[in-house]
Image (cartoon, rainbow, N blue to C red):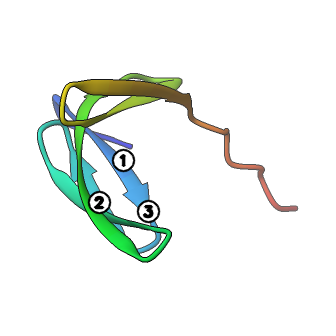
């Protein structure tokens, strides 16, 4: 989602912008993952010095 000059990533009712951290639970442990980039079709997450870029799936329009 784009509001003015700022891109936001929406997860449920929460919205995050570049530089925000979000808690991720994996195998019983919680990690603070930073959102390092948000593009029109993808976003990048960082944990420590490692990064992963994931595509953003388009929202299907309901009739």
Q: Earlier in the sequence, mark 1 or mark 2?
A: 1
Task: Say which quarter of the image contains residue 45.
Answer: top left
Q: Residue at x 11, y 39 (%)?
A: 19
Q: Residue at x 20, y 25 (%)?
A: 49
Residues at badges 3 and 1 in contact (C-beta under 8 Å)?
Answer: yes
Residues 27 and 32: in front is: 27
Task: Say which quarter of the image contains residue 5.
Answer: top left
Q: CA distance from mark 2 to mark 3?
A: 6 Å
Q: Residues within 10 Å of mark 3 (few under 14, many from 20)?
A: few
Residues at badges 1 and 2 in contact (C-beta under 8 Å)?
Answer: yes
Task: Say which quarter of the image contains residue 39.
Answer: top left
Q: CA distance from mark 3 to mark 1?
A: 7 Å
Q: Which type of secondary structure does the marked residue at label 3 adopt?
A: strand
Residues 60 and 47: in front is: 47
Residue that label 1 marks? 9
Residue that label 3 marks? 11
Indicate the quadrant containing the N terminus: top left, top right, bottom left or bottom right. Answer: top left
Indicate the quadrant containing the C terminus: top left, top right, bottom left or bottom right. Answer: bottom right
Residues at badges 2 and 3 in contact (C-beta under 8 Å)?
Answer: yes
Q: How many marks?
A: 3
Vertical side of 36 occupied by 10: above or below = below
């Amino acid at each position: 989602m784009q509001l003015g000059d700022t891109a936001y990533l929406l997860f449920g009712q929460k919205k995050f912008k570049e530089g925000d951290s979000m808690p991720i639970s994996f195998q019983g442990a919680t990690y603070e993952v930073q959102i390092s980039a948000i593009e029109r079709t993808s976003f990048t997450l960082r944990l420590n010095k490692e990064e992963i870029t994931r595509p953003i799936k388009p929202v299907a329009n309901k009739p």
